[in-house]
């Protein structure tokens, strides 16, 4: 099982870091939405292209609260649950089969 444990542990670690980076991207998009940036700015377009497909899939299930779109909060909570619920279990499993 040694040959399966370390690659699985590495994959979980990489996925954990990618989800952390995506969380920061979501926070950046939220902060940018408060400032009303130029939509033609390349950085704004990249950030929106990275987040809007996910937002569009979740937005129909999240009601507006006082006119606020809570979709980014729901996605960040889901990412946190996945990181600390699912990935930790897989990481622990990978660590145990590698030792």
Image (cartoon, rainbow, N blue to C red):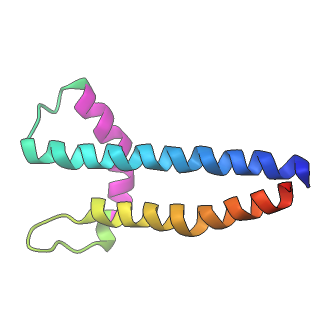
Looking at the rendered image, the quarter that the N terminus falls into is bottom right
Q: In this view, does 29 lie to the left or right of 24?
A: left
Q: Which of 79/33 is in front?
A: 79
Residue 69 lies in quadrant: bottom left
Residue 92 drawn at (x, y percent): 70, 63
Q: In this view, does 53 lie to the left or right of 91?
A: left
Instruction: Provide the major secondary structure of the magenta segment.
Output: helix
Task: Work out which residue is located at the far front of the displayed protein and give it.
Answer: 99
In the depicted view, which residue is nearer to us: 22 or 39? 22
Q: Specify the segment rendered in magenta.
A: 43-58
Quarter of the image where one finds residue 80: bottom left
Residue 46 place in picture, x, y as percent: 32, 32
Q: Which residue lies at the image location 33% right of the left edge and 56% below the top edge?
A: 55
Asked if residue 83 lies left or right of residue 26, the reply is right
Question: Is residue 35 shown in magenta?
Answer: no
- Residue in view at x 31 percent, y 49 percent: 26
Q: Looking at this view, is 4 or 68 the one in front?
A: 4
Whether residue 54 is in magenta: the answer is yes
Residue at 37% from the left image edge and 41% from the top image edge: 50
Q: Residue 72 at what x, y percent from top left?
A: 29, 59
How far across and how far down the image is residue 6, in percent? 79, 47
């Amino acid at each position: 099982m040694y040959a399966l444990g370390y690659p699985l542990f590495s994959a979980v670690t990489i996925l954990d870091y990618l989800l952390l980076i995506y969380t920061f991207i979501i926070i950046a998009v939220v902060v940018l939405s408060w400032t009303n940036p130029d939509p033609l700015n390349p950085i704004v377009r990249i950030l929106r292209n990275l987040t809007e497909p996910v937002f569009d899939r979740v937005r129909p299930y999240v009601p507006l609260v006082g006119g606020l779109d809570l979709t980014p909060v729901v996605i960040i909570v889901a990412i946190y649950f996945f990181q600390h619920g699912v990935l930790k279990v897989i990481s622990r499993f990978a660590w145990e089969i590698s030792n």
